[in-house]
Amino acid sequence: MPVIAWGATMRRESSIHGQWSSKLVFVLAATGSAVGLGNIWRFPYIAGENGGGAFVLIYLACILLIGLPIMMAEIALGRRGRQSPINTMATLAREEGLHRAWGLVGWLGVTAGFIILSYYSVIAGWSLSYVFRAASGAFAGLDGEGVKNLFEGLVSDPERLLAWHTLFMLMNILVVARGVRSGLEKAVKFLMPALLGMLLILVGYAMTQGHFMQGFAFMFRPDFSQVTGDTILLAMGQAFFTLSLGMGAIMIYGSYLSSRASIFKTSATVVSADTAVALLAGLAIFPIVFASGLEPGAGPGLIFITLPMAFGEMTGGLLFGTLFFLLLVTAAWTSSISLMEPAVAWLVENRGLDRPLAAMIVGGIAWFLGIGTILSFSLWSNPIGFNLTLGGESLFIGGTLFDMADYLTSNIMLPLGGLLIALFVGWRMNRRSVEEELGLRSRVFFKAWYHVLRFAAPIGILLIFLKAVNLI
C-alpha cells in the first residue's frame, strides 16, 4: 500500500478496497449511511412534540457542537488509517505510540454496527412488506382497528418476518459483495437521488392536501414553553445518533475518501443533507396525517398504523403509499450496507477472503442473529432479565432480545464509541497528525473545532449516556 511519511505517523494514499470516484459520491454514501428509518419518522415527531422550531434550533446547535466535530474526527481517522475500523484504530494507536487497548475502539464500533444490522434488517423487512401491501390496495377501506390488526398479524408471524428479513439481507449482500466502486458506489449513486426524488414528490403531494401549513406549524412554530432539560438532552441524542457516529460506518467510508477532499466541507454537506431529509420527511408526513384527521403523535405507530390508514382513505393513496414505503426501504438499504461494510472489510484484510465470501459470511451471521429479533415479537415476547434493588426501589433490567440489543447499542455502545473517538483525536493523537489530516487552512477555525472536540463534545456525550441509563 503506498504511503507518505509525515513525522511520527504514516499517511496512506488509498485503501486496498478502493476509493470513491469523487467527493460527491462520498457525500451520497455518508448521507445514505446517516439517513435511515429514524430520520423519516423520529426526527419530525420529536420536533413537533418538543417545541417545534425551538427544538429544531437546539438540535442544530447540538449538531454543531457534537455531531459535526465527531463526524470530522471519525472521517479523519478513517482516511488516515485506510483500513477497516478495527485495523485503523490498532494501526494509529501503534503509530502514535499509544497503548494497544485503543484498538478496541474499532472493535466496539464494528460490533455495535453488526448488532444493529441484525435487527435493523428485520424492521426494514416490515417496510419491504408494506411496499407490496400498499401497491395491492390492502389499506383501502380499513379503519384503525383493521390497520392495527394487519400490522400485528405481520410482526407476530415468524415465518413471514423471516422471509422479508432474508430478502432484505440478500439485498445488502449483493451490493457489498461487489466492492466499493462496483457495489457501494453504484448503489448510492442510484438510491440517494431516488430517495430525494421520492421525498420531493411526497412533499409536493402533501402540499395539495390542504393542511400543509398545519403540518409546517407543527414542526417549525417555536414553542419555548415546551423546552426543558430533557428536550435539550433529546436534541443532543438525536444529533449524535442520526449521523451514524460511533458504529464504524463513517470511519470505513472515510477510508475510501480522496486525500484531496476537504473533510470539513464534505462533513458539513453530509450533516446538512441529513437534516434536510429529516425536515422534508416531516413536511411530507404531517400534512397527510392532519388532512386525514389522524393523530400525529403516534411514534413508531405513525409509520405502520396511522399513515396506512391515511393512504387507504385518500385519493391517490395507492400510488403515494407505495412510494412512501419504497422511500423507507431505500433509506434502510443505504444505511444497512454501511453497517455491513466494516466487518466485510476486516475479513478481507485479516482473513484473506474475497469480497463475495466475506459479504455472505457477515450477512449470514447477521441474518441468524436477526432471528432473535423476529421471535421477540412472538414466541420470545416475554421479557427476560433480573430485578435490581437501588435505594429500596426495585428496577427491572432486561426485556426481549430485541429490546436488549437496541438498548445495548443505542444507549451504551454508540455513545461510548463516540466518546472514545473524541478523546483519542482530541487528547491522545498527535496534534500535528490531526492538523495534517484535516487540512484546514484557517488556524483559528482549527483551534475552535479542536477545543469543541476536546471539551464540549465529550461533555455532551456523557450527558446523553447518563440520561440513557437514567442516572440524570
Image (cartoon, rainbow, N blue to C red):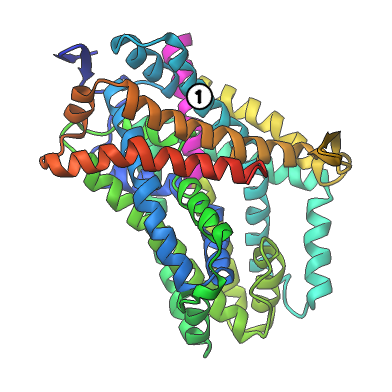
Magenta residues, as a range?
334-355
Q: Does residue 372 show up?
A: yes
* Outermost residue, bottom side: 210
Residue, x 48% and y 24% (percent of image)?
344
**Helix, strand or loop for the magenta stretch, by majority:** helix
Q: In this view, does 388 lie above or below 136?
A: above
Residue, x 52% and y 61% (percent of image)?
43
The picture places residue 462, in percent across and down from the top left corner, at 51, 39
**Based on the displayed image, in which of its 4 quarters is residue 10 positioned?**
top left
Residue 352 lies in the magenta stretch: yes
Q: How crowded is mark 1: few (under 14 residues within 10 Å), some or many (20 or more)?
A: many
Left or right relative to 267: residue 470:
right
How many marks do you count on the picture? 1
Identify the secondary structure beneath mark 1: helix
Left or right relative to 164: residue 274:
left
Residue, x 62% and y 32% (percent of image)?
115
Q: Does residue 248 show up?
A: no
Residue 263 lies in the magenta stretch: no
In front: 395, or 117? 395
Residue, x 69% and y 63% (percent of image)?
304
Residue hosting label 1: 343
Amino acid type indicated by mark 1? Ala
**Based on the displayed image, in which of its 4 quarters is residue 226 positioned?**
bottom right
Q: In which quarter of the image is the N terminus?
A: top left
The picture places residue 278, in percent across and down from the top left corner, at 46, 62
Q: In this view, does 330 lie above or below 173?
A: below
